[in-house]
Image: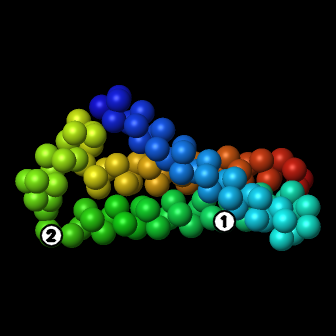
Amino acid sequence: MGMDFYKCLKYSSFVSGILVILIGVCGFVISRGNLITALESIKAVLFAVGSIGLIMGAVSIIKKDREKDRDWLEWKKRFEIFTYRVTISIMSIIILLYGCIIDEILFMFVK
């Protein structure tokens, strides 16, 4: 379970890092150098991506169709315990946590 969680943390950190860089640069350029606006853009995108991921995880849990044997065996090569439903949910929560960190940074700057 620990390795599965580590993989989720690694993959979601990679996705969050790419989003932070892309949205940060775009937000910084569009706002003509305003760091607060760039951070607000990053926070909004991280919250949106994390929320959409949680919705996808919830829908896949509710969905009646269970995974097929071939797909399940392929998934088990990457994650020992977690199903794709749990993996999507955990990765989305981690992305939302990165958004909360950006929000806390903004809270400290904008006092």
Q: What residue type is labelled 2?
A: Lys
Residue pointed to by mark 2: 64
Q: In this view, does 23 lie to the left or right of 29?
A: left
Image-quadrant location for residue 13: top right
Residue 44, labelled with which disc? 1
The quadrant of the image that shows the N terminus is top left
Neighbor class of circle 1 (other Cα within 10 Å; few <14, some 14-19, many 20+) is some
x%, y% of residue 6?
42, 33
Asked if residue 81 shows in the view, the reply is no
x and y percent of residue 43 in the render? Answer: 68, 59
Question: Going 28% across and 52% down the picture, which residue do you hit?
Answer: 84
Separation of residues labelled 2 and 1 (CA atoms): 32 Å
| Residue farthest along the top direction in this orientation | 2
Q: Which residue is drawn at 91% across and 67% down?
A: 32
SS for dot 2: loop
Q: Residue 54 at x, y = what percent? A: 42, 61
Number of numbered callouts drawn: 2
At 28% from the left and 40% from the top, the residue drawn is: 78
- Left or right: residue 35 compared with residue 46: right
